[in-house]
Image: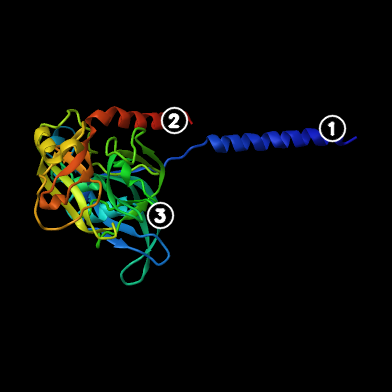
């Protein structure tokens, strides 16, 4: 006799709970802060035992206004108020970039979220604090134009040998296909030359795509794309463009590389070598049949007698374009030996197609 009323009440209760759940799902909130100002002190990096490190600095923003009303307003005194903000950078990769490049007096734009919490000062006293958790940093000062190339250079480490990877899109690293080795690690150094001071952070990656025509028996098509699991969109410096011309007319290029030891591991600081692209005729004279189409070279066959060894893949930056990826060498580029690069001009459609196709797949899902 009570079955129907009970079922009706239960049905109404479930419907009510469902409506509440729906309203909760649809409700959205926003915690977003945008600041433009000057840095008040050089950043410090701190780490509490058992927690990730954090880079901290202060940022000053100014508010200006004139006193007076109506006609007298334009002639009124100018008043100014400075507000100081505590900026904390937890994000992997960004915290190293901020620690190295943010300097006292720099004019920067910070985007992040506000956080209310506590911190312990230098006297070990706990204090209340409002902190901006930075998610992105952009440099506005003119001295940041033409930002250091090294912010886009990554160390590719494996149990066998090392390579250099270059960021060509926020989530994509380009290198040589022969760098696809066991236990490959992608290490971000935040633009630092000194690997002792900044040992770097290992970035997760989700996919490796080797050029379909690459074979281990030939240096041709020696290219590989690595898709990172995270997008490195936090820095304002422009990513290198892919080449718009074959054999870039800008002859002077920069090659960024590390030395490697007898075990194939990188050591020391980043070397940036300024070199001139040889003519195809000279490259063919030096290298003979080994010089193939879609290659260009630096140096000569003899070089210096001084011995050294660099990592087995590195980028050639000509102007603002990533012109090539080192494929093989007759010796050490630091001592003037011939080094052969894959010219990326012919491969630009393949690179762009992979990046755009994978991005489209993400948007569809």
Nearest the camera: 224 or 331? 331
Asked whether residue 287 appears in the rendered view, the answer is yes
The CA span between labels 3 and 1 is 52 Å
Instruction: Give the number of callouts.
Output: 3
Neighbor class of circle 3 (other Cα within 10 Å; few <14, some 14-19, many 20+) is few
Task: Write down the residue under mark 1.
Answer: 4
Left or right of residue 256, residue 115 in this image:
right
The residue shown at (38%, 38%) is 209
Residue depth check, mark 3 versus mark 2: number of the one nearer the observer: 2
The part of the image, by quadrant, that contains residue 244 is: top left
Q: Is residue 171 visible?
A: no
- Label ID, residue 248: none
**Depth check, front residue: 233 or 19:** 233
Residue 280: x, y in percent?
A: 12, 33
Q: Nearer the viewer, mark 1 or mark 2?
A: 2
| Disc 3/disc 2 C-alpha distance (Å) | 38 Å
Residue under the point 29% across and 35% down: 221
**Which numbered circle lies on residue 116?**
3
Residue found 15% across the figure and 40% down from its top: 287
């Amino acid at each position: 006799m009570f079955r129907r009323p009970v079922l009706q009440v239960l049905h109404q209760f479930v419907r009510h709970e469902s409506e509440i759940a729906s309203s909760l799902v649809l409700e959205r909130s926003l915690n977003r802060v945008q600041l433009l100002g000057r840095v008040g002190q050089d950043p410090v990096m701190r780490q509490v035992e058992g927690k990730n490190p954090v880079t901290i600095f202060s940022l000053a923003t100014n508010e200006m206004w004139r006193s007076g009303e109506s006609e007298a307003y334009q002639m009124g005194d100018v008043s100014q108020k400075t507000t100081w903000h505590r900026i904390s950078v937890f994000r992997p990769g960004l915290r190293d970039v901020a620690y190295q490049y943010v300097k006292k007096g720099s004019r920067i734009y910070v985007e992040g979220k506000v956080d209310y919490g506590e911190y312990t000062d230098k006297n070990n006293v706990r204090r209340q604090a409002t902190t901006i958790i930075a998610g992105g940093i952009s440099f506005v000062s003119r001295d940041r134009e033409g930002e250091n190339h090294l912010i886009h250079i990554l160390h590719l480490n494996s149990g066998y040998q090392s390579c250099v990877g270059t960021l060509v899109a926020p989530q994509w690293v380009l290198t040589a296909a022969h760098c696809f080795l066991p236990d490959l690690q992608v290490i971000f150094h935040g633009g630092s030359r000194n690997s002792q001071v900044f040992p770097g952070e290992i970035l997760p990656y989700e996919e490796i795509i080797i050029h379909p025509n690459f074979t281990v028996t030939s240096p041709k098509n020696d290219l590989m794309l690595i898709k990172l699991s995270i997008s490195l969109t936090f820095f304002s410096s422009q990513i290198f463009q892919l080449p718009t011309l074959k054999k870039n007319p800008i002859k002077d290029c920069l090659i960024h590389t590390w030395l490697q030891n007898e075990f194939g591991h990188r050591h020391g600081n980043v070397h940036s070598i300024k070199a001139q692209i040889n003519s195809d005729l000279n490259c063919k004279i030096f290298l003979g049949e080994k010089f193939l189409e879609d290659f260009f070279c630096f140096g000569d066959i003899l070089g210096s007698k001084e011995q050294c060894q660099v990592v087995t893949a590195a980028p050639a930056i000509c102007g603002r374009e990533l012109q090539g990826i080192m494929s093989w060498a007759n010796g050490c580029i630091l001592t003037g030996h011939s080094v052969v690069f894959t010219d990326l001009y012919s491969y630009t459609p393949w690179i762009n197609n992979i990046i755009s196709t994978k991005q489209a797949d993400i948007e569809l899902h």
